[in-house]
Image (cartoon, grey):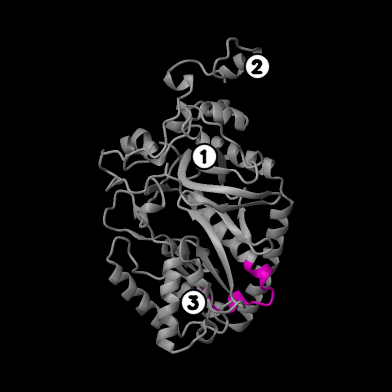
């Protein structure tokens, strides 16, 4: 019965009427999304995100250990939750509970564990994936397409297929080893049934395979996709570059628009080789937008109106920024997105529905503007040593080396009553808060 319904939806979605209606609805939603993004208050949006995350996780082991019930603002969060790396979270909370991670740092269920194939992209490759994280990532995808619709108002994205080539992050069902699958393929399956016919995520491009196998698969994928009406492609710079090269080689065409005449946009994850990707696209009519997405959550998307990455303050991620020149201090200063200074390099720390809290993810950013919040990625300084070996499997106890110094924990973490550091007295309000 499900197959019959799916076939019927696929047939209806392929009709010209359905695609025109879908384009009209999507264009309206895109305008509303951009208006909402432009009108929101950065500080208020981030405070709402933080309190929402804390409220959902206050019953977890991490929430109890760090007195989440007492957190009322960003200052409370900084005081009670020290900076960590994903490796430290693994050793302290995820490893003792593995494979039942529900309730460790985020309430259940935790159906997947994200394993990045690009091990040099961060200090630790394993991230829990919760349903709330799925929703946040899908919201980021819709925001990216809203930017495309604004920059290309005549484009009809729903007249063809949205092709998610992938980032290399694999999802492994917890307790089911050897069943890893691409994050994008699973994400497309979890889309509403009426939306699935418009999106494609290829199967088979597994992480950890040889470079020649990757290139062979991309060549085969390019041959199969030539006949598809592709309107938008998303993926990493390396995969997109090789995919486009094979598509032009197979068809003998010089321009990408000659291969896919309705191609409107290319969404790429940043990294080296951006110039080569632009040359492979070969036409300014095709919009190229950078994405800054991590398994822990969506960080930023390139806003075509400003030509820079824009921070996403309402996509389920709370951001903190630590000045690089002070990262080695025992209690390094942490600033919210509304408190950062222009032109100062910061190490990025995130808290999200992945169950990461004040977690240094190994990225360095610098703000170019605060209203709207525009930033750019910087090259890694020497403190982020990527040559060190990482943990091979999520069940081995061998810890990875720490790329950041450990922050001194708050007094509450070592068994003493919660109070601001070096505070010699307690107020009436703090006494009442302790009774909650």
User: Which portion, as a residue range, is magenta?
Assistant: 148-162
The residue lying at 37 percent from left, 41 percent from top is 101
Query: Percent x, y for residue 135?
Result: 53, 53
Which numbered dot is residue 384?
Answer: none
Whether label 3 touches label 1, CB < 8 Å: no
* First-in-chain label (3 vs 2): 3
Tag 2 secondary structure: helix
* First-in-chain label (3 vs 1): 3
How far apart are the two marked residues, 3 and 1, measured between alpha carbons?
A: 35 Å
Q: Is 151 covered by the magenta stretch?
A: yes
Q: Nearer the viewer, mark 1 or mark 2?
A: 1
The residue lying at 60 percent from left, 75 percent from top is 157
Residue named by callout 3: 280
How far apart are the two marked residues, 1 and 2, measured between alpha carbons?
A: 36 Å
Residue 96 located left or right of residue 261: left
Which numbered dot is residue 324?
Answer: 1
Is 379 rendered above or below residue 279? above
Q: For the N terminus, give its image quadrant.
A: bottom left
* First-in-chain label (1 vs 2): 1
Which numbered dot is residue 429?
Answer: 2
Q: Nearer the viewer, residue 18 or 326?
A: 326
Label 3 neighbourhood size at 10 Å, few (<14), some (14-19), many (20+)? some
Q: Is 317 covered by the magenta stretch?
A: no
Label 2 neighbourhood size at 10 Å, few (<14), some (14-19), many (20+)? few
Whether label 1 touches label 2, CB < 8 Å: no
The residue lying at 57 percent from left, 21 percent from top is 436
- Is residue 109 among what the camera can see? yes
Is 83 rendered above or below residue 24? above
């Amino acid at each position: 019965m499900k197959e019959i319904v799916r076939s019927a939806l696929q047939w209806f979605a392929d009709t010209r009427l359905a695609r025109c209606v879908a384009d009209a609805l999507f264009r309206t939603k895109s305008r509303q999304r951009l208006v909402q993004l432009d009108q929101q208050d950065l500080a208020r949006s981030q405070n709402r995100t933080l309190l929402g995350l804390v409220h959902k996780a206050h019953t977890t082991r991490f929430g109890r250990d760090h007195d989440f019930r007492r957190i009322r603002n960003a200052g409370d969060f900084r005081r009670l939750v020290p900076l960590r790396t994903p490796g430290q979270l693994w050793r302290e909370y995820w490893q003792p509970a593995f494979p039942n991670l529900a309730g460790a740092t985020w309430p259940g269920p935790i159906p997947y564990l994200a394993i990045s194939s690009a091990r040099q992209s961060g200090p630790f490759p394993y991230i829990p994936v919760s349903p709330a994280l799925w929703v946040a990532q899908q919201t980021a995808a819709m925001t990216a397409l809203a930017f495309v619709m604004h920059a290309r108002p005549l484009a009809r994205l729903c007249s063809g297929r949205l092709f998610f080539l992938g980032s290399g992050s694999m999802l492994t069902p917890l307790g089911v080893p050897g069943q890893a699958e691409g994050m994008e393929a699973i994400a497309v399956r979890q889309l509403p049934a009426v939306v699935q016919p418009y999106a494609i995520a290829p199967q088979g491009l597994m992480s950890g395979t040889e470079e020649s196998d990757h290139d062979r698969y991309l060549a085969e994928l390019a041959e199969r996709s030539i006949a598809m009406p592709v309107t938008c492609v998303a993926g990493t710079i390396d995969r997109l570059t090789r995919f486009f090269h094979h598509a032009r080689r197979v068809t003998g065409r010089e321009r990408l628009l000659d291969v896919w005449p309705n191609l409107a946009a290319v969404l790429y994850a940043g990294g080296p080789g951006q110039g080569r990707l632009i040359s492979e696209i070969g036409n300014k009519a095709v919009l190229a937008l950078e994405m800054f997405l991590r398994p822990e959550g969506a960080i930023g998307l390139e806003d075509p109106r400003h030509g820079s990455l824009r921070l996403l303050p309402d996509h389920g991620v709370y951001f903190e920024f630590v000045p690089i020149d002070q990262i080695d201090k025992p209690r390094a200063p942490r600033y919210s997105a509304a408190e950062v200074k222009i032109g100062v390099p910061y190490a990025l720390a995130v808290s999200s529905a992945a169950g990461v809290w004040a977690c240094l993810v190994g990225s360095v950013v610098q703000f170019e503007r605060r209203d709207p919040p525009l930033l750019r990625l910087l090259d890694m300084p020497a403190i982020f040593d990527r040559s060190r070996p990482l943990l091979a499997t999520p069940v081995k106890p061998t810890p990875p080396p720490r790329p950041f110094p450990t922050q001194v924990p708050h007094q509450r973490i070592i068994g003493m009553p919660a109070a601001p550091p070096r505070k010699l007295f307690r107020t009436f309000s703090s006494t009442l808060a302790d009774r909650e």
